[in-house]
Structure formats: structure tokens, C-alpha cells
Amino acid sequence: MGLPSINIVFQTVADNSIKMSQKGVVGMILQDPIVEGAFTITKVSDMDTRFSEENKLYIERAFTGYINQPRSLVIYAIKVTGEPEEQFPSLKAGLDYMATQQIDYLVGPYTTNETQATEIKTWILERRKENTTPKAILPKLAADSEAIINFSTDAITVGEKTYQANAFCSRIAGLIAGTPMTISCTYAPLTEVSNIERKNKSDMDTAIDNGEFILMHDGKKVKVARGVTSLKTIGEGKNEIFKKIKIVEALDMIRYDLATTIEDTYISKFANSYYNKCLLLTAIKGYFLEMEAAGILQEGTSSVEIDLDAQTAFLKEKGTNVNEMDEQKIREADTEDKVFLKATVKVLDAIEKVSLNVAV
């Protein structure tokens, strides 16, 4: 008979996600004196040649990438009058459009100021409450969130030009989006950059601990100091691992895959029997095994099961005498239209620290 259809769907989702984990999608809101509206491009040569020179460079920097280039750029251009460097309009039109797109990392204009950065941050946090997983690279914004990368390096020299943090956010978005999910962007080199605002080791450690994504100069080249989010506050279900971009990316992908696949394939399409709950458990476990095989999850650490505590609480609320039921009977009990599951996964981290003792 072959695998049940829901198993096949989850396996297909896993296969597609593993392929897409090699590179992500960058969303970009621009201000331009001529161009307006929405565009999706997959290479630099696709861009509208009427964009201002600074916007062209901003787009080009995004496509620099890292191991890979971003899969695509989703662009929304807001037309402004006068010099873009002197205009700071609301980004609402661009954000409304981005809400209709599936993006991984969002950046504002190359002139983004604090008000616009805060507007993007608020939008990101609201969107993530709706089972979507966008993140943003914002200049010098201490957001204290795993969904915001606080890029804070200034005085970035590329050729004859020097950029501040806001004008280089697209480069960082493209770099992170071009980092396969099996590795980290820590120490990723930016070969086109000759110099930056330099910090000593103590100041760099402090910045990283404060949730700042910074560049460093190791004496030979400029590179990412550490791939961290802006999260500082630990608690409420978030521990130290949520400070790492690599971990957050993997968890976001899994959360999105499970939520959307269950919604599209399972909800309202199966009777809520114990057998069908087990069918869903088997499909999710198969998805986890695919992620383990791809090196995204740590092998042998993934599990999913009926949440006995949540199911027991539901039955008690409905007046069922659970004292006369063993665990298996609780698992098999009728839960009306609700399914209570709990899962455990461990994202495989990248090597970022090596201790080496040399005996002589």
C-alpha cells in the first residue's frame, strides 16, 4: 500500500526545506526618487536600471552572499521626492507588501534611521505571532529579540567608499541568507572590505554579549565576529541558544514547516481518532529523522509524542475521571477536535570555539 499520504507530504516538505536551507530570501524596502512598487529578482542583472546609484549598490551588496547568494531579493520601492538621505517616510506600504511574501531576512533603506528601524522591529515581532518567521537586520537597534540582528559596525571601507551600519545592512542580510543551515556565519570573511571601525578584544566581547552583530579585523582581513541575534534577556522559554542565528534559523524552519504542513494536510482532513493521531506522530518523526540525516538536528535526539499532561488537563476540564485511567487510556481518550502533542529537538550547532593544549 505504500506510506500514508501524510507521511509522503512530510517527507516532501523535509526534502524541500533541506534544499532551501542552503540559501534564503532577503526582503528589502527601498526609497527611490524614480522607481516605485514591488519586484522580485534572482540576480543583480534583473534589477531595474532606473534605481539610484546608491540603491543599485545596496542591492548588489545583498547578492554578494557568503557560501551561496540569497535565493532571491523581494524588493518594495517607496518613491520619495528630494534627496533619499533626507527623507524618512513611514515604511508601512513596504511592510504591508512584505506581509504577503515569504521572506527570511528584511532590511530597510540604506538610510534607515532609528524610527524606521523601530517600525520594522515592531512589524517583525507582530508577524512572528502569526506562525510566520521573518527576521530583520537593523542598524544599531538593541531589540533584545532572537528575530532581530542588531548590526552595529561603522566606518566600513570598500574601495574608495566608507559606509555606516545602515548602508551595510543589505550586505549582512545577504551574507546570512547565503549561509547554509549546517554551518554558522561566524568568521565569515568580507573580502571586499579593507577596513572598519576597530575594537579591542574586550570591547568586542562586550558588544557581542550585548547582542550586537559586529565585524572584526583580525590583522589580515575583515570578518564576522560572531553570528548572534540581539537577544539578551533569558527566560520565558528562551535560553542561551536563542542568541545564535544558526539555531534560530533551524528552529524557525521547523516551526514553520510543522505549522503549515499540519494546517494544509491534516486539519479537517482526518477524524480525530487515536489511530490518526499516531499517523501524525509518525509523519512528524519522519520529518525529524530527515533533518537529522541532513545535519540540521542532532542525531538521535528528536522525539514527538502525545502530551499526556495537556491531554489529562483537558479531560479533567471536561469532567472525565482520569483517576481511573492509565496512561494508555489517556492517550487513546476522545479529545474532541483538539490534538495535544509535544516534541523535543536539538539543533546541531557549528564549531565556534576550539581549545588546544600543546605539550612540548
Image (spheres, grey):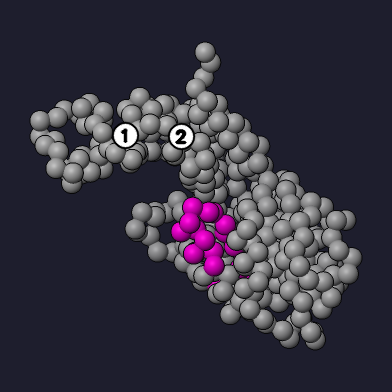
Looking at this view, is 45 or 294 the one in front? 45
Give the magenta part as a residue range. 123-141
Q: Is residue 169 visible?
A: no
Residue at the spot of label 1: 306
Spot occupied by residue 259 in the image (x, y as percentages of width and height): 48, 44
SS class, disc 2: loop
The residue that appears at 20% across and 27% down in the rendered structure is: 329
Residue at the spot of label 2: 269
Q: Is residue 259 visible?
A: yes
Residue 138: quarter of image: bottom right
Dot 1 or dot 2: first in sequence order is: 2
Spot occupied by residue 338 in the image (x, y as percentages of width and height): 33, 41
Left or right: where 319 falls relative to 93: left
| Residue type at numbered disc 1 | Ile
Spot occupied by residue 205 in the image (x, y as percentages of width and height): 52, 63
Spot occupied by residue 269 in the image (x, y as percentages of width and height): 46, 34
| Residue type at numbered disc 2 | Lys
Gap between marks 1 and 2, in whole Å? 19 Å
SS class, disc 1: strand
> Which quadrant holds the C terminus?
top right
The residue that appears at 57% across and 67% down in the rendered structure is: 150
Looking at this view, is 77 or 208 the one in front? 77
The answer to if 134 sits in the magenta stretch is yes
Answer few, some or many: residues within 10 Å of disc 1's Cα (few below 14, many 20 plus, some between 14 and 19): some
